[in-house]
Amino acid sequence: MRLPMTAELPAGAHYGLLAEFDTTKELYHACEKVRDAGYTRWDAHTPFPVHGLDRAMGLKRSPMPFIVLVMALLGGAGGFGLQYWVHSVEYPLTISGKPHFTWPAFVPITFELAVLFGALGAVFGMFALNQLPMHWHPLFFSERFERATNDLFFISIESWDPKFDPVATRRFLEGLGARQVELVQSS
Amino acid sequence: MSHQAPRTLTAESVMLPEGHRLRRLPMLGAAATIVGIGLLTVFGAAHPAKVYAAWLVAFLFFLSLALGALYFVLIHYAVQAGWSVVLRRLGENLASTLPVFALLFVPVLLGMGDLFPWARPEAAGDHLMQWKAPFLNRNFFLLRAAIYLVVWSALALGYARASRAQDATGDVGISKRLRRFAGPAILILAITQTFAAIDWVMSLSPRWYSTVFGVYFFAGCYVSWFALLALLATALRRGPLKDVITVEHLHDVGRLVFAFVCFWAYIAFSQYFLIWYGNLPEETFWYHLRLQGRWQALSAFLAVGHFVIPFFFLMGRTVKRRGPWLTIGAIWVLTVHFLDITWLVLPSIGQGYFSSAILAGAVLAVGGIVTMVFGRRLAGRPLVPIRDPRLAESLALDNA
């Protein structure tokens, strides 16, 4: 049985290969080579954001901006709609002699709700796209992998990548200047 | 991420080459000035008041661009910006046209009695005008205008000269000195610009109150300057600065246009909202003027055209990274900014001060003179501060 909030992966004895690099520069160029070699199920792990790594990895553009825009528009429409419904339909009160449908008075809350929903969309959209929260992942079997949060840079290639071969892929990664390549078990 | 050695540039490689389209700016400016003065003479000779009103609109429009450029240069130094080094000389060049505005201000002075109610003889019998007279009187107005124009010119020329001196020496100390002075300079500019907006725009309706007006005018200055910068950057990318100003710089300029479109809308709505909500006659009359007759359509158009349309148009990444699309957005923003200035000035002056031929004449005359000076500066020095210590950082800009 799969535990909740752990990585969802196909079955297999090995998760994949974990290659370790000393510098961002080595990692960056290694990523370009892995991308060009046609691997599809792989990832890079760094202690801090590396500029341009998404390009070196050939990642597609994130759908994040679109999610935020849609959420913000929904929030704005909801905020405006709620005020319209309360003030003009359900419970109309006359305030300082102004009409019940006073759209300028609705703008601040419309704006705030658009910002709020946009921000919530950004946070939870990011969680969803990153499959977070994820409390456990097979890479944690590797002790050296802890240093991905400290001072080392890693590339992991999953064993279910169509191009994966335990021997050839290991040799390929070593050829890219990996300091050490480790086979990580999957469970 | 690149790992090449830091790039450097030579002065020759970043001069505006012979035959480049922007080389024709001084000639175009001269032609526009002649046509503009012709239009003003033919259509305006019998209506001097209309000429003064149109001149004030044109003066404020081009002034706002130059002030926006000066803000840009000062803020660039104050925050030690790296990305914008390759664009800074364009700002220096436009800000350096500020001394010319002293000359361009003369018609406004001549038309004072037609433009400003407090400068008319009737003001003598008006209690409120009398109460405001210690500030709003001809001599003090003239003195303040002189102070603004001298301060702005000094700041603009001081920064431009120092930057030019660095081209020769590469002295990092110049950048440090300019940075240290940039903070106080922004404060001085913000205060003088606020008072100028009060003097030259708000005092057209001397009974009106709005504490946010200086910021409103700033928002227009800054957004229109970045729109113009986008046009200049796109034009120069087709020429000597092909590999110097990159898509990344266009992207960032586009973002700033987008950001200050939002900022303008925020300030414009705040001003409207507070006055609408407070509902005090001495404040609401200003909007009331603009919500009747033909101004009503312009008010509605500004809300949509100065915010909704550019907001959605400039939102996407692709638009900001494609020269032609960004150009369309920039021209649009400059157009609506011009309409915004018109909307601020003309309804306050009164009915019957609008004539499109005279307005076109004033825009061509003022714009022509500014373009001449700007064009000469553009052609006369390297387009990029070639020895700025942060040039390599700017050349390697990557938004990733």
Image (tube, rainbow, N blue to C red):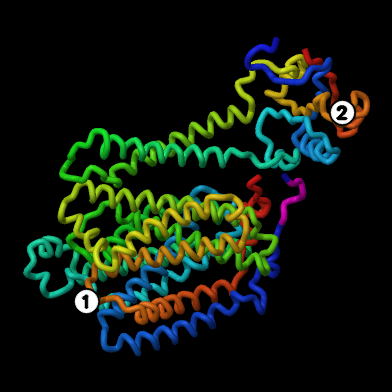
Label annotation for residue A164 = 2
Which residue appears at 59% of the width and 50% of the height?
B317
Q: Label 1 crowding class (10 Å Cα cut-off): few <14, some 14-19, many 20+?
A: some
The disc numbered 1 marks a residue on which chain? B
Res B171 seen here: no
Residue B25 lies, in percent from the top left, at 55, 77
Label annotation for residue A40 = none
Which of the two residues, B313 or B69, is positioned nearer the viewer here?
Answer: B313
The answer to whether residue B332 is left or right of residue B252 is: left
Which of the two residues, A88 or B312, is positioned nearer the viewer here?
Answer: A88
- Which is closer to the viewer, label 1 or label 2? 2
Disc 1 and disc 2 in contact, CB within 8 angstroms:
no
Q: Label 2 crowding class (10 Å Cα cut-off): few <14, some 14-19, many 20+?
A: some
Check disc 2 and give the amino acid type. Phe
Which of the two residues, B250 or A93, is positioned nearer the viewer here?
Answer: A93
Q: Are marks 1 and 2 on the same chain?
A: no
Q: Which residue is mark 1?
A: B114
How far apart in space, not on screen, are marks 1 and 2 (Cα)? 83 Å
What are the residue bounds of the magenta stretch? B2-7
Magenta span dominant secondary structure: loop
B281 over B295 or under it: above or below: above
Residue B339 lies, in percent from the top left, at 38, 66
Residue B351 lies, in percent from the top left, at 22, 73
Check disc 1 and give the amino acid type. Asp
The answer to whether residue A46 is left or right of residue B107 is: right
The disc numbered 2 marks a residue on which chain? A
Quadrant of the rendering where the C terminus of chain B is positioned? top right
